[in-house]
Amino acid sequence: MAGQYFGTDGIRGRANKFPMTAEVAMRVGMAAGLSFQRGNHRHRVVLGKDTRLSGYMIENAMVAGLCAAGMDVFLLGPIPTPAVAMLVRSLRADIGVMISASHNPYYDNGIKLFGPDGYKLSDEIEERIEGMLDKDIELALADSDGLGRAKRVDGVHDRYIEFAKRTLPRSMSLSGLRIVVDCANGASYKVAPEALWELGAEVVAINVEPNGFNINKECGSTHPAGLQKKVHEVRADIGIALDGDADRVVIVDENGAIVDGDQIMALIAESWHQSGRLAGGGVVSTVMSNLGLERFLGDMKLQLHRTKVGDRYVVEHMRAHGLNVGGEQSGHIVLSDFSTTGDGLVSALQVLACIKRQNRPVSELSKKFEPVPQLLKNVRISGGKPLEEAPVKAAIEEGRNRLGKSGRLVIRPSGTEPLIRVMAEGDDPHLVEAVVNDIVGILQETRSAA
C-alpha cells in the first residue's frame, strides 16, 4: 500500500523526522491499542526493539500511547523480530510491537505491528490504523482509571532460545560444527550465539557489541565480507549472518562463498520434499527471486509462487494456499511450521540440520542450482513519479521485448527507501546488463530533468 505512514514493512524512516517522530509513535500506540481491544480482560502488548539509539525515544513514546489506550505493556528490550511474533502468542497478548528498521543504518528506525495471532497486520488493518492517526483520537482513549501499566519482563530471551532449539529434533546435536555467527550488532547479539552453543556447536560470535550506532554497520547479512574473512580465519564449517532485527539470514560456506535466500529455500524445500514434510507442492517467494530457483523447483515437479516484494505478502500467500516454505532472496525465510514471520536463526538451524543429516560440507549442499544471470541496480529519487513518465515507460517496454520469454524484468519503487529498483535476469548476461543500464540511464535523465 502507498500510505502516508505505512510502507511494505510497517512504518519506517529517519529517526526524529516524520514519520519516525515521538509524536507519531505515540499516536500509533494509541491507534493500535484501540484497534485491538476485544472483550473485558486486561489488554496487553509485547514490545521489543533492536539496538539502535533511537529505540529509547520510540519505545517510550509507544508506551505512552499504548497505556493511554488502556493497554498493559510488557517491555522485552532488545530481542529479534521473530521473538516478538512468538511471544505475542506465548503471552496471550493482544498485539505485538517491534521497534526496528531491520537492515537499515542506525539513523533510521521503524515500527512493525503483529496481531494476536503473531502475524503481521494486513493492508486493511494498517489502513484502518493509519486512518485514525490524523483524527481526534484522544476522544476515544481510556478514562483515568483505565490507563495501562508498563513493566519489564524477564526471561524472554530464554523463552525464544528454547523455542528455536525445539525446531530441531530433540536428538540432534550440533557438536562437531564450528560456526561463526555475525549478529550485526543487533537484536540477536545475545540469543543467537547462546542458542547455537546450547545445541552443542563451537561458536565464534562477531559483531555482538552494540553501542546504538553500529547496528548493520559493515556487518550482518547486508555486509557479509567480515563474516567471510572470519570463516577463513578460524576454518569454520559455516558462517551465519543475521540482520539488525534477525528476521533475515545469509549463509557463508566453508570456502567463504555466499549462500543467499534463494539457495537456502531450495535446500530446505528439497530436504522437506524428500522427507514428505513440504506442504502445498511448492514454495512462495517474490518477483525478485532468481529464475534458477523456479527451474530447480520445476525439475522436482514443484511450483514457485511469486508475490510482490515483502515477507508479509509471502506469508499471506502461504496461509491462503497451504504452503509451509517461503521467503525472499534477501534472506527472509518463512517456515510456517515454526514461525509466523521471517526468522533468521530458525532458518539457519534448518540448514544446519541438513548438514548434520547428510554429513556433507555446506559448499556441496547449498549450491542447488546455477543462478540465471541477474543484475539489480538502484536509482535514488527525490520525489515525483518517474515510473509514470513516457520515456521511462517506453524504455521498460523495450527492455521486456529484448529479454523475451527467456528472461524477466522487474521495476519497482522500494517500500523502505527513496529508491527505484531495476532488476533484470536472463540467460545472456550481456543483454541483461544492457537492459538494466538503459533503463537506469533513462531514470537518471528523468530525475535530472525534474
Image: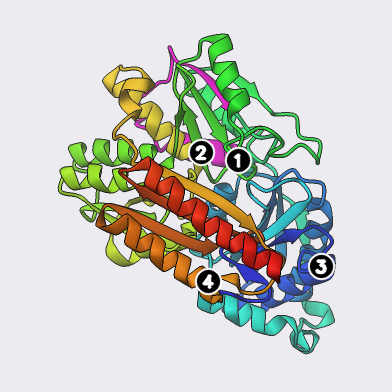
Compute the Cα span from label 3 to label 1: 28 Å
The three-letter code of the residue at mark 2 reads: Val
Which residue lies under the disc numbered 3? 64
Start and end of the magenta stretch?
A: 158-181
Answer few, some or many: residues within 10 Å of disc 1's Cα (few below 14, many 20 plus, some between 14 and 19): many
- Of tags 2 and 3, the one toward the viewer is 2
- Amino acid type of the residue tagged 4 in the rendering: Pro
- Counting residues from the start of the chain, the first of labels 2 and 4 encountered is 2
Examine the rendered structure and indicate whether residue 220 appears above or below residue 411: above
Label pair 4/1, CB-CB below 8 angstroms:
no
Q: Give the labeled residue for mark 1.
A: 243
- Badge 4 is on which residue? 391
CB under 8 Å between callouts 3 and 1?
no
* Residue 335 visible in the displayed image: no
- Nearer to us: label 4 or label 1: 4
- Left or right relative to 143: residue 361: left
Label 1 secondary element: loop
Is label 4 in a helix, a strand or a loop?
helix
The numbered mark, 2 or 3, whose residue comes first in the sequence reads 3
- Percent of width and height locating residue 282: 25, 52
- Structural distance between the alpha carbons of marks 2 and 4: 38 Å
